[in-house]
Image (cartoon, rainbow, N blue to C red):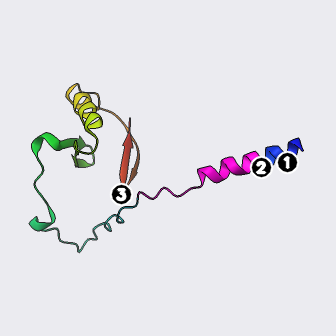
């Protein structure tokens, strides 16, 4: 009986970690190919206070902050950036056109 209970608990635990991580939004755009042309109309104006600029050895990254969605998170990121927390930080994982993880 104990073995059956342990097996059932393990199965439930593993099943819980296998749930989909879909955010429900549209899929990300495909990455540009060498023949892709990006025009001015592909961009929009971002308020300077909501633009996080990261310069890396691989180029510049622009991130639009959205304080209307996550005001406390945005304020914390701004504070850390102003204090130089991110300077020299290593990037652990980068998935093109999806996400970059550091910290």
**Residue at left 24%, top 33%?**
75
Image x and y of residue 86, in percent: 29, 32
How many tags in the picture?
Answer: 3
The reply, left or right, for residue 49 in relation to residue 95 is: left
Give the distance between the C-alpha atoms of the residues marked 3 and 1, in whole angstroms.
Answer: 44 Å
**Residue at left 10%, top 43%?**
48
In the rendered image, which residue does mark 1 sit on?
4
Image x and y of residue 19, in percent: 56, 56
- Return the mark for residue 96: 3
Disc 2 to disc 1: CB gap under 8 Å: yes
Q: Earlier in the sequence, mark 2 or mark 3?
A: 2
Q: Which residues are magenta?
A: 8-23
Point out the frontmost of discs 2 and 3.
2
Nearer the observer, 27 or 6 = 6
Image x and y of residue 76, in percent: 27, 31
Q: Decide: is 82 above or below 53.
A: above
Would residue 15 be counted in the magenta stretch?
A: yes
In the rendered image, which residue does mark 2 sit on?
8
What element does badge 1 sit on? helix
What element does badge 2 sit on? helix
> Could you tell me what secondary structure mostly forms the magenta stretch?
helix
**Residue at left 36%, top 66%?**
27
């Amino acid at each position: 009986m104990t073995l059956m209970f342990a097996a059932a608990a393990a199965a439930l635990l593993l099943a819980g970690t296998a749930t989909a991580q879909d955010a429900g939004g549209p899929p990300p755009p495909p990455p540009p190919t060498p023949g892709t042309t990006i025009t001015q109309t592909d961009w929009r104006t971002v308020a300077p206070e909501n633009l996080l600029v990261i310069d890396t050895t691989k180029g510049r990254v622009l991130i639009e902050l959205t304080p209307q969605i996550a005001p406390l998170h945005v304020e914390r990121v701004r504070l850390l950036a102003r204090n130089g927390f991110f300077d020299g930080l290593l990037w652990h994982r980068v998935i093109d056109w999806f996400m970059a993880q550091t910290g």
